[in-house]
Image: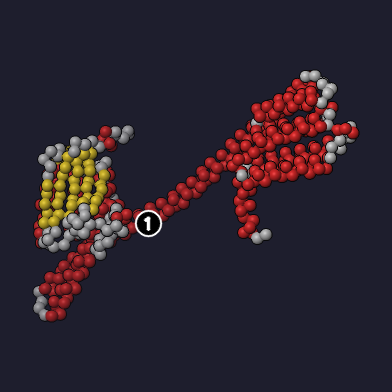
Amino acid sequence: MTSGERKPWHAIFRLLERDERVFAVLLAVVMVGGLSTLGLVPLRPRHRIDLYWLVFWFAAYKVGIFALVTVNPRATRAIFVGALAIDLLIVFALLSLTGGADSLFYLLFFPLVAINAYYFGPWVGLGAAVVAGGLYALAAWLVPPWAGWTPPLLLAAFFGLPAMTLGLVAERERRARNEVERLNVELTGTLSRLQTAQQELLVAERMATVGRLSLKVAHEVRNPISAIELNAELLDDIVRDRAGKDMDEAAGLVTAIRDQVNALDALTEEYLAFARFPKPNFEEESVNHLLQELADFIRPVATRQGLSVQVEIDPSVPMLEVDRGLLRQAILNLVKNGLEALSSGGALTITSHFDAEAIEIAVSDTGGGIPEAVAPRLFEQFFTTKPQGTGLGLSIARQIVEEHDGEIRWVNRPGRGATFTIRLPIKRASAAHPAHV
């Protein structure tokens, strides 16, 4: 037989619990062995039976029970209950055929009741003992002479008490084993979580070291950037004062240098702002006034690019406790994103709205919207689709909004670009439940 042919049977055997396999095999061995042993005792001529065939068919019946449980493991308990009833009836038949009360085959009740008490528990064992006593009494009544009620009662008691004790011990052992297995599973899970936490801690320590190092690098790079920018500006003045084709080409190169230096300077500034995020200082401010001021600030830049900026203010918006500088930075980052998504002739709209529980600030553009491939990583740090982007603008904006106990969400408007909305609650949770010092 190939390994491929063995696998299904191996899988079926694995479905059986250890107790089921032990119970089936132990009961079969004890009953067949007990029947064979008792068959060696001489019987009266009129009570003789064909022992060899009896043992053979009884063994075949037990093999059939084991096979049935193997093929249908989910019905194991019901099969064993049926087998217990059949075994009791088989012993009763043997008693009736071999002398009733005088037959030694009543001894088969002992292992039958005991092993079933081990598997099913004390109450099934006690019930089986009572049934065994009743069957013994019935066999004694059917095959005279009648021995009275004392032997059946003693038999039920002698069977029942050990069965109850064995069943209680088995249940206690089973509970203890289940508890050990449960604790083992918990311990394994705890060790796994501990190993995962240890690995995450190591990664966090490395990332913290890299973060501190990169912060120091970013800080140290600012001075050379300033020097390069200053010298590039001086060189630009010198080049522009001189005429000639070579000087025009040189002026273009200097302009390119200054553009790249400015981009690098913006990157380091945003990184330092993200790494050194300040603690918010909340004061009552007018959100509408802040939006109007921000629109006036960016409108000249937008106009030069052929873009329009509109502001739609809800007069019912109340004063709100915010960090004006941080909130302005968050809205400005959204505005910059919107402007960069627009082409000539596009429009950017900044709106405010009050719904009794929160103030919403929305920045909408008429660009192409957010591509589906980009959406899952929209707020991811350092992720950008722009050649000169830093990938920190939206991340910083979300961090600022969360410091205000708010949320930021976005939605694509079919055919009309995208809208980013900042929702700020009127009452901050951190203000309602200040930290205890």
- What is the x, y in percent for residue 18? 65, 42
- What is the x, y in percent for residue 422? 22, 46
Q: Amino acid at mark 1?
A: Val
Question: Looking at the image, which residue is at 83% across and 40% down?
Answer: 51
Q: Nearer the viewer, residue 141 or 392?
A: 141
Q: How is the image coloured?
A: secondary structure
Q: Quadrant of residue 262?
A: bottom left
Q: Nearer the viewer, residue 117 or 377?
A: 117
Q: Is residue 62 above or below residue 433?
A: below
- What is the x, y in percent for residue 301? 12, 59
Residue 5: in sight, yes or no? Answer: yes
Which quadrant is home to the C terminus?
Answer: top left
Q: Quadrant of residue 183?
A: top right
Q: Quadrant of residue 393?
A: bottom left
Q: Seen in the image, is 342 located left or right of residue 64?
A: left
Residue 268: in sight, yes or no? Answer: no
Q: Seen in the image, is 175 located left or right of residue 288?
A: right
Mark 1 secondary-structure assignment: helix
Question: Looking at the image, which residue is at 76% across and 38% down?
Answer: 31
| Residue bearing mark 1 | 210
Residue that protrudes farthest toward the bottom in the picture = 245
Q: Nearer the viewer, residue 383 or 346?
A: 346
Q: Seen in the image, is 363 located left or right of residue 145?
A: left
- What is the x, y in percent for residue 77? 62, 37
Question: Looking at the image, which residue is at 63% across and 47% down?
Answer: 71
Q: Nearer the viewer, residue 302 or 213?
A: 302
Q: Is residue 146 above or below residue 363?
A: above
Question: Looking at the image, which residue is at 73% across and 32% down?
Answer: 89
Label 1 crowd (10 A; few <14 / some 14-19 / many >=20): few
